[in-house]
Structure formats: structure tokens, C-alpha cells
Amino acid sequence: MSYLPKGLPEPVTETDKLDQPYWEGTRAGKLKVQRCGACNTWQWGPEWICHNCRSWDMKWVEVEPKGKIWTWTRCWHPVHPALKAAGPYIAVLVELPHAGNIRMLGNLLGDPHQTVTIGAPVTAVFEPHDDAKTPYTLVQWKLA
Amino acid sequence: MAEHTLRGKVAVVGIGETTYYKHSQSPDPEFVLALKAILAACEDAGINPRDIDSFASYANDRNDPSRLSAALGCKELRLSNMQWGGGGGGGAAAIGNAAAAIVTGQAEIAVVYRALAQGQFQRYGLAQAGGTVSGDNALINPYGIFVPAQRFALKIMRYMHEHGIKQEALRALALASYHHAQSNPRAVMYGRPLTEEAYEASRWIAEPYHLFDCCMENDGAAAVVLVSAERAKDFKNKPAYVLSVAQGSDHRNAARSFNAPDFHSSSFGPVAPHLWEMAKLGPKDVDVLQSYENFTGGVLMSLTEHGFVHPDECNEFLKLENLIAPSGKLPLNTSGGNLAECYMHGLELQIEAVRQLRGTATSQVPNAKVAGVIAGPMVTPVSTMIFGSEETL
Ligand SMILES: [Zn+2]
């Protein structure tokens, strides 16, 4: 059971494979992000080079799948055909203070009409899409 | 060391627009719209279209300068320039790029133009069905975040949280554009005033954006003619001199997955200081301001990042009476702007600034000498500019 209806675009690994470890990680229920092997800077989304020290030695590190709501929006207007009958849904940008304050987007599970509080702690919920052409797992969030 | 500046060296001497239509309503194909706007700008300037030698645009305009030049029978083609990236954020930059070419001897008579026929092509506010996504979109689209209204809602939501800004501040920005459109027969929303009640009752698009916080989508075209300041004196219209242009964005603005350090921003953080430095002016010197409304939240952050209002004073300052011509403290979007005149990707704002300096605007600010134009915010790169009358040189 996914938070949003079927029919939204299915994420696939980039042809250059830059983000492959992330998508392999979520399939295994692990949240992996980049960390520089030279200067320990956290980096998200993925890039080939460390933005802090220009090292090419970017490691993929598993991080505890938790964070805080940094900002959010409740979407009402169906901008995609698959969302026509979905009603409102909440997107949250979650900050990971234990991983250099990197941010990642997801949906906030639960009542779509709930009051959302910036700063509220959340934990990740891995949402598998096993029947997709290329099966994938999204990282969603729920209040901790 | 020599001062490197565009200040006062180039002027707009002609402006042209087509009729502005609701999206997909244009009877003309997009290329015809572009031609009509350019011809109108030439007529306004009093030049023969054959003499245009240079073209500049932005937002991946589909109307190629080589085709335009051939269709118009121009004697020669010199500059063919496209601002890379940033969509409507490139409106001022396109003028700056053309102006820079003129000052450095690479162009003589330049047209900056933008044409949109969204019926002929895909609309901005709707996503394509099905398929797969990769890269940055793979981290965003599967969560139902596709269009600018949603992406930019995330920015202003955080900004409002940090500075205690209320919805009424956004509302005032929407009301100002609609107020001015009621005096402007060209405006798509002419004859359709907006009240506080109608704003509040309008549906949410993506919180905190109501319907009326979001720009329209329109069909039409706009163009301006630029020449050097020396030549500008030979034209019939009062020249609108380019006093300053700045483009760019802040540190790592395009960091993926919304990881820009200053994500909750209009992207003008380091850009606006360059603007003021070249203009040798500050926010208090601006008589009338056009600020691109993709969404009201972007206008709000554009105003704060340019120094027109302190972030913590938005609730007090952003009230309708402060934002309307002729007597408001900061007359804003005096033609109706992207919200209520036409979403001509902001080039209609440059044209309105020129009209204000000529004294021919439908909501005229008396004796306007300094007119600011802030192009599309919250993207990268953004751009911003100041026009001045002859007295400001
Ligand atoms: Zn590093």
C-alpha cells in the first residue's frame, strides 16, 4: 500500500549510475547517503565530487533513518493525472542533523489534513513498489 | 583601474507587445507572436526591422534568432544569445547580455524578446503522465512534487516560519497586482478585481499558496529594442537607460534534492548587492518596482533580499496601500504583472518599467525616474535590473 496512487513516474537509477547505491540501499531497507572519504563532509543529493574539498573519494554511508521536518507543503491541486482523485497530500523536506544537516524529500504518512510542525522529529518508513517494471523503494516519513 | 560598468551606456528605445491571451487561446502560432511583438517594438522605436542586427532571449525561447532574422529580412545577424538556465529568471539577464554586447562592439541594434503559445506546446503547470524519472527528479516526483508551485511552496513555508510572516503579507502582493490590472485594458484580468475575501476563499494549490498567489499561464509575445546611449538620443521616445544589471545565484543554489544552503530564498542574496553597486543607488532611490510573480512568496523574498523591506517587517510593510500607484511607498507591479496582466515570462515587467519612465503607464507613478525590475525569483540563475531616466545618468 503506497501513500500516493499508482501511476506516478517510477524512479530509476541514472544511466551514469551515480545514485545506484542509494536505490540499492532503499530496496534493502537502508538509508545510504554520500560522505567524503577525505574531509568527512556529508553530501546529498549525490554528486561525483566533494563540494567541500574536491575529492573524488565519495563514500556511501548508511545513516540512521530519522530526522526533523525542515519545511513542508500540503498539495491540493492535482498536477499529475495519477493524482486526480488523490485529495491533498503532504510533502516534507526532512533534515538529518546527524548527517551534516542534509535534507531529503518525502511524504508525511498519516492524516493528510494533520497539522504539520516544522522541527518535529520523524523516522523513515521504507515503501516498496515491488510490482514496478524496475522494482524500487521510496523513503517516506512518519512522526517519531 | 578602469570601472567596468553598463551604467548609462545602453537604453531601451522601443517596446512592443502582442495582445495577451489566456493560455492556449492565441489565434497565432508562437513564431508569429514573436514577429508581431518585434515589429511592434520597431514601430514604437521608429526603426526599420531590417536594421536589427542582434537578438537575445531567455528561458529556452523556441524562436531562433537566425530564423527571425531571415524572416524579417535583417541586413545582417550579429549577436544570437540565449541566457542559460533559470527560465523566467533570465528576463533582466537577457537585457544585460544584449547591453554588454552593444557596449563591447558586438551588436548595434538589439532586440530582446520572449514569445509563448502554450496551446501549441506543453504547459508549465502540468506534468507528463507515466514513465520513469532519474536523477534529481527521481528524488522528488515520486512524492508528488512536480511543478514550480509545489517546489517553491517549500521555500516560502520555511521563510515564513523563520520570520513569523503571515498569509496576509502574501495576500497584499496578490491584491496589488490585481489592483493595478483594473486600470490596464491590456491586462488579462482587467475587469476582474480581487478582494481579500475572494483571495481567502480561493482554493489551495500548494500551501501556503492559494490560487491567487500563483501566476497565470498565457499566450503572447513581448520585445524591447536596445541601442547605445549615444544613439538613443536620436530616437523619438524618451530613452530608458540601463543603470544596472546583475545575474547569478547564491552558493550551491542548485545542490540536488533541495540542499542549497540558502534554500529558503529568492536566490538574490549575493546578486542584489552587485545590482546596487553598479547602479550607485539603493532601494530607497527606486520610484517604482516590478517584481516577477511566479508566486507571491518569491516576490516577498525578492523584496527582502533587495533590501526593500526587512524580513521581520513584512507583516507591517506588505499592505495594499504601500504597494499601489500613485502614492504608495513602493508602487509594485503597476501593470498587473504576471498575476493579472500577463505571464509573458516577465518581459512585460521590463516594458512596464519603460512606460513608467516615459510617463505613459496606466497606473503612473508621478515623475518616476528610477524603475527596478526583478526577474523570476527562486530559480538559478536569477537576474535583476534598474532602468533610469536621463536625469539619473
Ligand atoms: Zn571532501
Image (cartoon, helix red, strand yellow):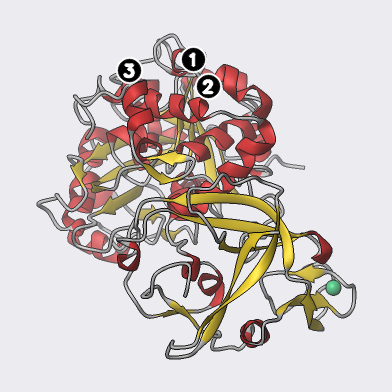
Q: Secondary structure at mark 1?
A: helix
Residue placed most toward the observer, B114 or B379: B379
Q: Quadrant of the C terminus of chain B?
A: top right
Circles 3 and 2: CB distance less than 8 Å?
no
For ligand 1, give the image quadrant: bottom right
* Residue at which label 1 appears: B322
> Looking at the image, which residue is at 20% across and 44% down?
B22
Instruction: Tell me the amino acid under the disc marked 1.
Output: Asn
Mark 2 secondary-structure assignment: loop
Q: Secondary structure at mark 3?
A: loop
The front one of B175 and B362 is B175
| Chain to which the residue tagged by mark 2 belongs | B
Report the disc number at residue B141: none
| Horizontal arrangement in the rendering, residue B41 relative to residue B139 (left or right) | left
Whether residue B326 is visible here, answered yes or no, is yes
Cβ at disc 1 under 8 Å from ligand 1: no
Q: Identify the amino acid type marked 3.
A: Ser
Residue under numbered circle 2 = B318
| Circle 1 chain | B
Foreground disc of the pair 2, 1? 2
Q: Is residue B16 above or below residue B371?
A: below
Q: Amino acid at mark 2?
A: Leu
Q: Which residue is mark 3?
A: B363
